[in-house]
Every structure is written in C-alpha cells, then in structure tokens.
Image: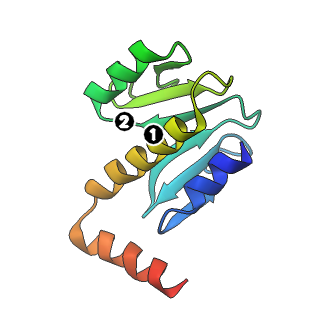
Amino acid sequence: MEALIGHCLSKAGAIKEFPFGPDPLVMKAGGKMFALIPGDGSSISLKCDPVIAENLRQQYEAITPGYHLNKKHWNSITLDGSVPEQELHDMIDHSYELVLKGMTKAERACIAEAAAEV
C-alpha cells in the first residue's frame, strides 16, 4: 500500500487529504480527486476512461465499478495481489492524467510550476 501512496504522491502537485474525516485517504491534484484509499488499505479507487474501465473489469475479478462513486468513470480495485503492481501504477497514472485533462490550461501550468519549484 505504501508503494501505491508513494506513486500517487510522486505526481506533480499531488497531495493527500482527509476531507471525509479520518477515512478514506484522498489523493488530489489541483483540488481534484484522482485516488481514494480506505483506511484498511484493502482497495484503491481510481478515475478511468469508461471504455478502459469496462475492459479492466472484464480482465480482473478484483476490479469493480467504483464503490460509492460514479460507476461509469471510477473503478475500485481490491488489493489482493491479483492485479500486478505495474498495472496498478499504470491505472494511477491514467487517473491522474484524466484529472489533469479536466483542468484549464492555467490550472495545469500552476501544477507544473509548483512541481518545478520542488
């Protein structure tokens, strides 16, 4: 789990927050959520293109429509070892990129600028 959190935080402008109380951990970029991790670390929920989301659900039993999220645009992945770690990293990257795409050019530039200062 720590490796996945570290991967999320390695993204430019990524921060962790607890906007719903002590659980779940929410990863954001530019104020937009790209990952949710429950306190028990049993799963991770990630934003996903709807076509890719459906494909992943067919490939892996551990990937289901987003729990308490928009089921068209979010997947929840049970972290039981059945989804390779590299695939999880790719899904985190995809979720982050989708969030960035939804931002204005100015918002993306602000994130890039902040990342360059680090």
Q: What kind of residue is marked 2?
A: Cys
Query: Circle 2 is placed at which residue position?
Result: 48
Secondary structure of the residue carrying numbered label 2: loop
Question: Would you say the residues marked 2 and 1 are in contact, meaning their CB atoms lie under 8 Å apart?
Answer: yes
Q: What kind of residue is marked 1?
A: Met
Question: Is the residue 117 above or below the residue 66 in the image?
Answer: below
Residue lying at 57% horizontally and 26% vertically, measured from the top left: 83
Residue lying at 45% horizontally and 40% vertically, measured from the top left: 91
Question: Is the residue 41 above or below the residue 67 in the image?
Answer: below
Q: Is residue 2 visible?
A: yes
Q: Is residue 69 left or right of residue 81?
A: left
Instruction: In the displayed orientation, state which residue is furthest to the bottom.
Output: 117
Q: Nearer the viewer, residue 7 or 34?
A: 7
Q: Is residue 80 left or right of residue 70?
A: right
Q: CA distance from mark 2 to mark 1?
A: 8 Å
Secondary structure of the residue carrying numbered label 1: helix
Residue 38: x and y in percent read 68, 35
Coloring basis for residues: rainbow
Q: How many C-alpha atoms fall within 10 Å of the one at disc 2: few (<14), some, or many (≥20)?
A: many
Work out whether mark 2 precedes mark 1 in sequence or the reverse, and give the earlier one: 2
Residue lying at 45% horizontally and 60% vertically, measured from the top left: 31
Instruction: In the displayed orientation, state which residue is furthest to the left.
Output: 105
Q: Is residue 69 visible?
A: no
Query: Circle 1 is placed at which residue position?
Result: 91
Which mark, residue 112?
none
Residue 52: x and y in percent read 31, 28
